Image (cartoon, rainbow, N blue to C red):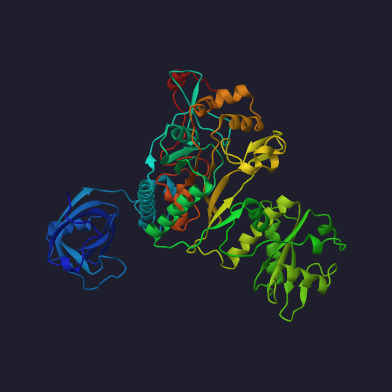
């Protein structure tokens, strides 16, 4: 090793020891006769000191020539600092340098490599290898590493076997768009990159592996946002001879283990909620249950009073914002503007102030008297000092809009504390959802999800009401994982394909290998996949998964550091049998 210690290792009991340190120059402070250098590596920062009369002239001259991000090797003696720094772990000591070697010089970096950098996101992504030197970014990577190790430790302790599955597979028509890879040896044919290892993990259950997991790269060619990347990582798991309760119990254990081992937090009770209740009470299949503000439907009280906006609506629904009756007209107008934004699309907002004296002031006083509004307040459990906010319109659209308003109010009122965690299972999703564009049903999860046993007889007669034996885990309003009990019977799988509009020939062409496998003794099985990047960002208190990926893509799906995707040569295209228009 070129060094005896790291830059985060030395303490006061190392005083008088001769040491060798290596790292990058964080900054140089030149006071003329005294020069200090902050030396940084992965483990921390150690201050080096050079003094005229105590440091050899040639060493002092080299020190004076150092710039930011120079890579150096420094030999010296540990001494106690006169002016200690309690912000760093090595702040009680410094190293008086006797020998200094520049291992590599550096150009002036395009941004300061400190926690509070002056570099914008685009610039930092272009020089990501420099951005990764910043401790705040590096700590994100260390958190990711820790979570990987703890995930493996827990699953290994539960008798799961880690198995790698192929990256070059065949394209299938369900889900998002596939990334496709041309085959040189089979021209005109293409591999696809897996959106998930779904069929392979089911085949591993047919193979008798019993419990499988993989921390695996997945690929989806879809529009990006903060919590999406074209390539992302899943904790992918499958179990044989289980029912839904076995899956929920096992993976509650995983999440509890991660929170305890990584963050030192004991997670409380993990609630369960049906999909229908989640949509009715929160307007979302991933509700943030850190705060209440549940939806209350007001059709029976608000309609047939002459207010046409409500009378013509499929749904009139509201939330109660506790302690907000003193909102000003400006604040209420801002809320109205918020829900009328194109992304939300509400036509307006009705408010009712519950005054301290027990009276009410609303934006619909013309249509509703004090007794009417008292009935609203009773149903919404609104007390003096509270504010009722009401939307109306088509059921699905109105619930989604009110969900956005609820989350906005949660932020405004400081109810969405990133250091508080609320874990929830959402159960019994619809098996199928109707697509108006294609005029057919699509699988809400994927085609291999089993219906709940009690709905099997409705699969042909009333497919829209069939519930899936599926489950999502939600943490603080973020879907972090989802899965289902799978179909393991060929006849039921054929029925499912038929509901999805597959002909027998199409099903055979796309999934014949899986259907064939089901004829050789497939066990009952089920599983789950966690979005590993999302889990990391949640644990790290960030809204973006990019912060926890070493080399992420931007919103256009580009890696601006290596300039990818890029064109390829005519010769490569010719080898692949591909022509560009």
How many discs mark residues in the rendered view?
0
Q: Which picture quadrant has residue 509?
A: top right
The answer to whether residue 320 is above or below residue 552 is below
Point 55% across, 32% down: residue:
489
Tell me if I can see residue 115 in this picture.
no
Q: Nearer the viewer, residue 466 or 218?
A: 466
Point 49% across, 24% down: residue:
190
Please state the horizontal and vertical placement of residue 574, each as a whole percent of the image.
46, 18
Q: Which picture quadrant has residue 413?
A: bottom right
Q: Nearer the viewer, residue 246 or 84?
A: 246
Please state the horizontal and vertical placement of residue 366, each as a whole percent of the image.
85, 69
Q: Nearer the viewer, residue 374 or 276?
A: 276
Tell me if I can see residue 537 in this picture.
yes
Please state the horizontal and vertical placement of residue 176, each as a whole percent of the image.
57, 37
Please state the horizontal and vertical placement of residue 65, each as a whole percent of the image.
23, 55
The answer to whether residue 340 is above or below residue 301 is above
Residue farthest bottom in this picture: 357
Q: Quadrant of the C terminus?
A: top right
Q: Which picture quadrant has residue 402?
A: bottom right
Q: In screen coordinates, is 370 left or right of 573?
A: right
The answer to whether residue 509 is above or below residue 60 is above
Point 77% across, 75% down: residue:
360
């Amino acid at each position: 090793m070129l060094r005896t210690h790291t830059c985060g290792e030395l303490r006061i009991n190392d005083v008088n020891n001769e040491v060798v340190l290596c790292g990058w120059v964080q900054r140089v402070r030149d006071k003329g006769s005294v020069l200090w250098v902050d030396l940084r590596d992965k483990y921390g920062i150690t201050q080096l000191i050079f003094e005229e009369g105590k440091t050899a002239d040639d060493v002092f001259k080299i020190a004076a020539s150092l710039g930011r991000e120079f890579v150096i090797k420094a030999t010296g003696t540990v001494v106690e600092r006169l002016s200690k720094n309690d912000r760093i772990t090595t702040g009680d000591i410094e190293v008086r340098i006797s020998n200094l070697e520049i291992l590599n010089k550096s150009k002036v970096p395009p941004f300061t490599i400190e926690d509070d950098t002056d570099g914008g996101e685009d610039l930092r992504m272009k020089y990501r290898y420099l951005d990764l030197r910043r401790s705040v970014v590096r700590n994100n990577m260390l958190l990711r590493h820790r979570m990987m190790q703890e995930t493996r430790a827990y699953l290994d302790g539960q008798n799961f076997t880690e198995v790698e599955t192929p990256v070059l597979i065949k394209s299938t028509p369900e889900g998002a768009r596939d990334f496709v890879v041309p085959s040189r040896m089979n021209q005109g044919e293409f591999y696809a990159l897996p959106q998930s290892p779904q069929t392979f993990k089911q085949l591993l259950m047919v193979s008798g592996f019993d419990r499988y997991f993989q921390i695996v790269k997945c690929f989806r060619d879809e529009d990006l946002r903060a919590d999406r990347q074209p390539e992302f990582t899943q904790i992918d798991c499958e179990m044989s001879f289980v029912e839904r309760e076995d899956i929920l119990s096992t993976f509650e254990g995983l999440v509890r283990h991660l929170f305890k081992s990584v963050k030192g937090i004991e997670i409380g009770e993990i609630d369960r909620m049906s999909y229908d209740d989640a949509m009715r009470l929160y307007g979302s299949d991933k509700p943030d249950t850190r705060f209440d503000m549940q939806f209350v439907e007001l059709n029976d009280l608000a309609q047939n009073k002459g207010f046409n906006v409500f009378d013509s609506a499929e749904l009139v629904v509201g939330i109660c914002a506790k302690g907000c009756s003193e909102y000003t007209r400006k604040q209420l107008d801002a809320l109205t503007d918020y829900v009328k934004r194109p992304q939300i699309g509400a036509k307006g907002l009705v408010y009712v102030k519950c005054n301290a004296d027990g009276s009410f002031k609303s934006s619909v006083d013309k249509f509703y008297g004090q007794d009417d509004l008292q009935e609203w307040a009773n149903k919404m459990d609104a007390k003096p000092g509270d504010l009722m906010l009401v939307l109306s319109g088509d059921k699905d659209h109105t619930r989604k809009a009110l969900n956005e308003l609820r989350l906005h109010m949660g932020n405004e009122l400081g109810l969405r504390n990133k250091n508080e965690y609320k874990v929830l299972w959402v159960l019994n999703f619809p098996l199928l959802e109707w697509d108006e564009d294609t005029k057919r049903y699509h699988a809400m999860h994927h085609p291999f999800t089993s219906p709940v046993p009690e709905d099997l007889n409705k699969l042909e007669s009333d497919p829209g009401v069939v519930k899936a034996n599926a489950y999502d885990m939600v943490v603080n309003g973020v879907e972090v994982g989802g899965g289902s009990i799978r179909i393991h019977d060929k006849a039921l799988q054929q029925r499912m394909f038929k509901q999805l509009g597959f002909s027998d020939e199409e099903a055979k062409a796309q999934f014949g290998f899986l259907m064939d496998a089901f004829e050789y003794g497939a066990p009952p099985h089920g599983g789950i996949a966690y979005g590993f990047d999302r889990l990391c960002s949640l644990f790290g208190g960030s809204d973006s998964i990019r912060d926890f990926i070493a080399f992420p893509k931007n919103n256009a799906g580009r890696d601006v550091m290596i300039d990818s995707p890029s064109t390829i040569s005519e010769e490569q295209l010719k080898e692949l049998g591909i022509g560009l228009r």
